Image: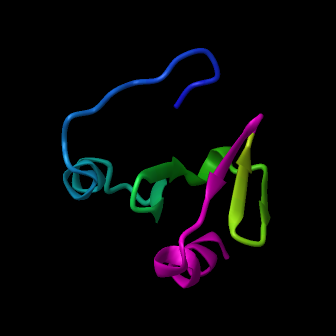
Amino acid sequence: MFADRNILVREKISEMLQILSNNEFIQVHKSFVISKKHIDKIEGNRINIGSFTIPISKTYKKHVIKLIK
């Protein structure tokens, strides 16, 4: 996701995470992978990145908090 455009990727998220395995990117939901350096704020089960709000699923919540610290 970019502020001015979306990029469609036809790979599985698990495959993309292997390609992006430099610990900069984390999966926060079954449909979302984000860059840690672009996180503005975490509020409850949501991450704010610019004007976008990304949900954090229960499945990934503990993992996200652990990686952010």
Residue found at the very far top of the displayed protein: 4
The image position of residue 29, as x and y in percent, is 47, 62
Q: Is residue 68 left or right of residue 33?
A: right
Left or right position of 26 against 51: left
Q: How is the image coloured?
A: rainbow
Q: Is residue 18 left or right of residue 55?
A: left
Which residue does the image show at 53% across and 17% down from the upper left? 5
- From the viewer's perspective, is 22 left or right of 57? left
Along the line of sight, which residue is nearer the eye, 46 or 39?
A: 46
Q: Residue at x 28, y 52 (%)?
A: 13
Residue 14: image location, x then y, percent: 24, 58
Q: Image height check: is 7 above or below 31?
A: above
Q: Residue sitting at 61 percent across and 15 percent down?
A: 4
- Residue 60 point in image, percent of width and height: 49, 75
Image spot of residue 46 (x, y percent) = 70, 61
Report the residue at 23% width, 56% height from top. 18
Nearest the viewer among 14 and 68 is 14
Quarter residue 42 falls in: bottom right
Magenta region includes residue 66: yes
Query: Where the C terminus falls, by quadrant?
Result: bottom right
Q: Nearer the viewer, residue 44 or 17?
A: 44
Count of numbered badges drawn on the protein: 0
Residue range in magenta is: 50-69
Q: Is residue 62 magenta?
A: yes
